[in-house]
Image (cartoon, rainbow, N blue to C red):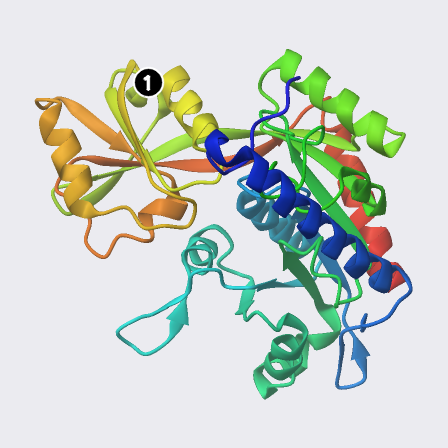
Amino acid sequence: MRSAPGPLPRIVTPLSWLLARCFGAAVSRRNARFDRGTGVEALVVRDVRVPVISVGNMTAGGTGKSPFVARLADELISMGRRPVIAMRGYRSHTEASGASTSDEQREYAVSAPNALVVADPRRRDALVVRLSQEDCASWLRDAVVLLDDGFQHRQLSRALDIVLVDATRPALDGDVLPHGWLREDARGIRRANFVVLTKADDANEVSSATALVRTLRGTDPDAVCRHVWDSVEVYEAGRMRMESLAWLATQRTATACGLGNPSHFERMTRRLSAELVQSLRVGDHRALATADIDRMMSSLGGGAVCVVSRKDFVKFDAIPTSVMVVPRLAISFAEHEAGLLALRTALRAAIVGS
């Protein structure tokens, strides 16, 4: 598999290569410090050591982390635990109520409604403050923190490090940012306790990504999963209704997204709808403009619907007048659920061992 080019235009390749050398050296020094245990602290609240499970990746851009974290929250609940999702709160903004929130927080409010979400760049301090409050006292000993995008956030000690690798764009054979997509040297994946291939729809992509992981880590990924749509929410004339994938298969569609890897979302839409006629992209975490959506849909002459991810839908200040379709996303494990069983075993071992 050929490595994907980095986020900067090719015209600045010499500059991006030099910047990557500086970035890589800085990250290596930082990792060496954490490898020695310097600056790493456990999460202890009211004399209770709360287990932390990190979910992260090696690359910038989307690997399907949010739906995977939501799935882990459900798994922890089934084990009698109380999930707490800790996140940086990237691109947070202040709502009319005065509360600060981000698109991922609003997404988790729908996809993981039974999890407590704590968003703050200083994640350990924020967790101590929030979990010290009286409303958490009765279930504190059952709490398990899911550290969203935590593989490089090494200040917080964790019981389990899960790394996700996007099978459609693993980028593990490329360079570090900004010349490539890697957040650190690809050999850093060896720190991971559990590696999962995500978006594993294509057998050739899975084979190539597996070979990259095996070369770097010495072992294959521990689990392989797909992002599947099980139904869709349709927003039309101010109302929401549920429709099946059979309904979507009869629709002409356009897509609009601000995702780290929009090509996978567009590929899913193309495969599941009657026809994908146009796509609109904005940068990762950026909000789509309602006017841009309606303008695009108007140019199609009617009869088409606009498919957006939930992550993008929750960022709208006002729902577009066009017919909007939001897929309901689920995580499906391959290999007759063997990967899911391995994941559950790893979760239990991490919780008991903390």
Q: Is 70 displayed left or right of 31 in the figure?
A: left
The x, y position of residue 28, in whole percent, is: 79, 53
What amino acid is labelled 1 in the image?
Ser
Q: Is 269 displayed left or right of 170 in the figure?
A: left
Question: Residue sitting at 86 percent across and 58 percent down?
Answer: 32
Compare residues 50 and 219 and report the one nearer the observer.
219
Question: Residue sitting at 8 percent across and 22 percent down?
Answer: 301
Q: Is 168 displayed left or right of 282 in the figure?
A: right
Q: Is residue 233 above or below residue 133?
A: above
Compare residues 216 and 235 and report the one nearer the observer.
216
The x, y position of residue 252, in whole percent, is: 23, 18
Q: Is residue 251 above or below residue 217?
A: above
Query: In what quadrant of the picture does the C terminus appear?
Result: bottom right
Query: In what quadrant of the picture does the N terminus appear?
Result: top right
The x, y position of residue 107, in whole percent, is: 43, 53
Question: Residue sitting at 26 percent across and 15 percent down?
Answer: 250
Q: Is residue 13 above or below residue 37?
A: above
